[in-house]
Image (tube, grey):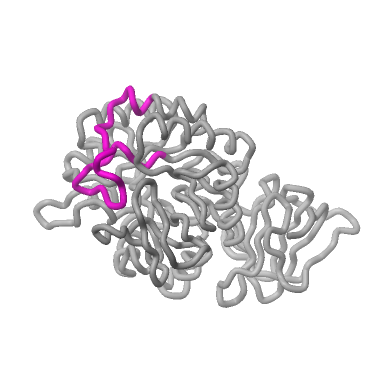
């Protein structure tokens, strides 16, 4: 860990800007922000042979470093946040899992304090308002219909820091809850759903704008019953989350989503649980026991995939080297798009003057070599 750079020029790298990649580019950092010009005497750091991209923005993350956002203490949350920062995620939304409403409200209150301090970007409620048919790694006995009064209780508990609620919008109260969320400026996300195509279209028309981990925990596409995936992919109002860990999605599914939705409507996420950055072993996801083996998290009972152990630097590298997506498209999906969803694009999500100095340094093979957050090196590149 290093001190703050008051005035530094990062020079010689391929710099990915909203307008494209600049060869032999430079990023000027003054204090906590990106500057448009360098003052006299600014220190120059040679990053030749590297890439500099915006810090990653993760809108769906349950924890890491052995610590849980969903059930942990404030110190646990900070442990998980630090673990993901070391892998390039400079902005993270803390996601909960299904639990008793009163417990979730208390957890949201604690998380809101960390959001107010700038440690996290807000709160995402995944559950309890989801379908028992598509519950995944959520406790069926704790599931609820999306009663707007209960939804309102949770977003009120987050004290203005609630960013997203995942709903099975076909359940009783689902559409009214979508409208409630839209009215309060909270993202309504369709996920863990057994909805039909027509029901999903209704939810989108009511104000749903995100697909929670598209393809996972929802019906597959059928030629007579296209289901939610087709509706979510085809509508330009919807951003689709994708978990690019090689377990949740076949590369062809990822390619389908990028091709059909376009890079401007994809958000790469981790859906990480405690084991991200912490290794194999036994963990808890809410009340459920999880075993992580060879980096894949599954419920001890039933074997359902239980989140991921993914970090966004791995998702980035896979997207470029295995999926062969253009670097600029990957940057949009891992930084700019999620920043816009959160209403934070004026501060993060791209390397532009005036924004926070949040950036990631990658080598020629797209392995992470450096991370800066608000002008401070979290991971210092070799030789810097």
Based on the displayed image, in which of its 4 quarters is residue 1 positioned?
bottom right
Describe residue 195's horizontal placement relative to residue 165 as left or right: left
The percent position of residue 254, horizontal first and vertical second, equals 34, 64
Where the C terminus falls, by quadrant? bottom right
Question: Looking at this view, is 273 or 84 the one in front?
Answer: 273
The percent position of residue 114, horizontal first and vertical second, equals 59, 38
Residue 141 belongs to the span the image colors magenta: yes
- Magenta part of the chain: 125-152
The percent position of residue 296, horizontal first and vertical second, equals 38, 66
Residue at 49% x, 52% y is 63
- Residue 180 visible in the snapshot: yes
Based on the displayed image, in which of its 4 quarters is residue 51 positioned?
bottom right
Residue 224 belongs to the span the image colors magenta: no
The percent position of residue 115, horizontal first and vertical second, equals 58, 37
Residue at 34% x, 26% y is 150
Seen as rendered, the residue at the extreme left is 224
């Amino acid at each position: 860990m290093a001190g703050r750079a008051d005035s530094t020029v990062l020079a010689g790298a391929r710099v990915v800007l909203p307008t494209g990649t600049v060869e032999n580019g430079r990023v000027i950092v003054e204090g906590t922000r990106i500057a448009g010009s360098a003052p006299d005497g600014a220190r120059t750091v040679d990053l030749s042979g590297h890439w500099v991209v915006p810090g990653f923005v993760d809108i769906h993350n349950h924890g890491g470093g052995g610590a849980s956002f969903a059930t942990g203490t404030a110190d646990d949350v900070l442990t998980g946040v630090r673990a993901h920062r070391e892998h390039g995620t400079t902005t993270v939304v803390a996601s909960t899992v299904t639990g008793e409403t009163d417990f979730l409200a208390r957890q949201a209150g604690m998380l809101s304090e960390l959001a107010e301090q700038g440690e996290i970007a807000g709160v995402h409620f995944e559950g309890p308002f989801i379908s028992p048919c598509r519950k995944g790694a959520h406790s069926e006995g704790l599931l609820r219909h999306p009663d707007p009064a209960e939804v309102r209780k949770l977003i009120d508990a987050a004290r203005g820091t609630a960013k997203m609620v995942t709903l099975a919008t076909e359940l009783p109260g689902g559409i009214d809850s979508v409208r409630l969320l839209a009215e309060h400026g909270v993202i309504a996300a369709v996920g863990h759903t057994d909805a039909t195509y027509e029901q999903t279209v209704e939810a989108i028309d009511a104000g749903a704008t995100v697909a929670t981990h598209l393809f996972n925990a929802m019906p597959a596409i059928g030629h007579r019953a296209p289901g939610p995936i087709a509706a979510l992919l085809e509508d330009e109002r919807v951003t689709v989350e994708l978990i690019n860990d090689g377990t949740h999605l076949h590369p062809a599914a990822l390619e389908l989503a990028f091709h059909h939705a376009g890079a401007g409507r994809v958000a790469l996420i981790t859906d990480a649980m405690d084991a991200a950055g912490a290794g194999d072993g036994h963990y808890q996801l809410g009340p459920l026991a999880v075993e992580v083996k060879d980096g894949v998290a599954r419920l001890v009972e039933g074997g359902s995939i239980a989140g991921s152990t993914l970090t966004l630097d791995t998702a980035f590298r896979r997207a470029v080297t295995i999926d062969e997506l253009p670097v600029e498209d990957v940057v949009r999906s891992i930084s700019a798009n999620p920043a816009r969803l959160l209403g934070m694009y004026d501060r993060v999500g791209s390397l532009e003057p005036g924004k926070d100095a949040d950036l990631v340094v990658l080598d020629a093979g797209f392995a992470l070599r450096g991370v800066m957050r608000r002008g401070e090196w979290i991971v210092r590149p070799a030789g810097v």
